[in-house]
Amino acid sequence: MPYLQGTGSISKLKTVLDSPVSYHLPIGESRIPLNECLGKTLRLESLGLIHCSHCGRRTKKSYSQGYCYPCMIKLASCDTCIMSPERCHHHLGTCREPAWGEQFCMTDHIVYLANSSGLKVGITRATQVPTRWIDQGASQALPIMRVSTRLQSGLVEDLLRQQVADKTNWRALLKGEPEPVDMFAARDRLLDGAATGIMALQQQHGLQAIQPLHADVTEIRYPVLQYSAKPQSANLDKEPVLEGTLLGIKGQYLILDTGVINIRKYTAYTLSVSVS
């Protein structure tokens, strides 16, 4: 008999930076505590319903992780500059939602290095540290610069990704822990390589707008009993039921002995979930 169960629309896993990270799955009005489900049988079933996480309208397909098509093409949070912040156009007066842009883009951002499937550079709003690192499955993270806007963070990231990756290899992420990286040495090497470009950005936007940080490395542990030697991604659109033993949780992924699933991909889907 199931000892934990729920039915409803889901959203991305909620996390707390404990040792290991504490995970909950939001479903409907409830939250399922996932850490205590490790080693138990987890069953997820898609009920074929998707309701836009913004307007609530039913949609046959989820766009931009949880939206209907009309919301996807009108919301600033779904614009191309969200994935490519160096293309932010708020300052041109063409933002889809200027007030939203003021709140979420015209605010302090952190440029960071993370070790997830290897060393990578990334950006996040200052208020999203360390949530962003956990969502990406980073085992080590180091803030290296604080900037005043999302556009500036994208411009700095663009300089640094000429030397280091800006993407995570999800298969490598779920196969095991990455080799430890000397994050301070990596930071110094990358900033030295981008020094000319960063100085030019400081001259353009102001010295106070783009500032180096001297922070500590955050080490992150995940609740994983066993990694997957050959991760196979489940697809609830094609096979609506995924059932197996929950072996671990890392980033936004659940690792089962029958497959792995990126929960964030299914934001706004209606699922039935049970643990036994």
Image (cartoon, rainbow, N blue to C red):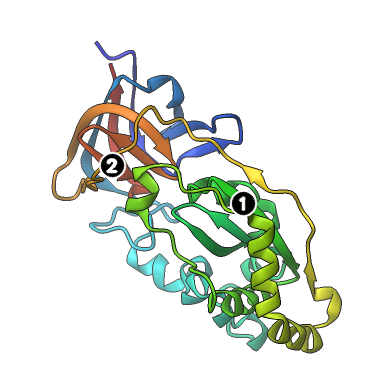
Question: Residue at position x 34%, y 31% from top?
Answer: 226
Give the residue number, with chain letter if any, for mark 2.
260
**Classed neighbour count for the residue bearing mark 2: other residues with Cα under 10 Å, few (<14), some (14–19), many (≥20):** many
Q: Quadrant of the C terminus?
A: top left
Q: Mark 2 falls on what kind of element?
A: strand
Q: In the image, 123: left or right of 7? A: right
Q: Amino acid at mark 2?
A: Val
Residue 35: x, y in percent?
45, 25
Q: In which image quadrant can residue 54 be found?
A: bottom left
Sequence order check, earlier mark of 1 and 2: 1
Q: In the image, 119: left or right of 172? A: right
Callout 1 touching callout 2 (CB < 8 Å): no
**Classed neighbour count for the residue bearing mark 1: other residues with Cα under 10 Å, few (<14), some (14–19), many (≥20):** many
Q: Quadrant of the N terminus?
A: top left
- Work out whether residue 67 or residue 19 is closer to the camera in this orientation and state it: 19
Residue 143: x, y in percent?
69, 57
From the viewer's perspective, is the residue at label 1 or at label 2 nearer? 1
Give the residue number, with chain letter if any, for mark 1.
141
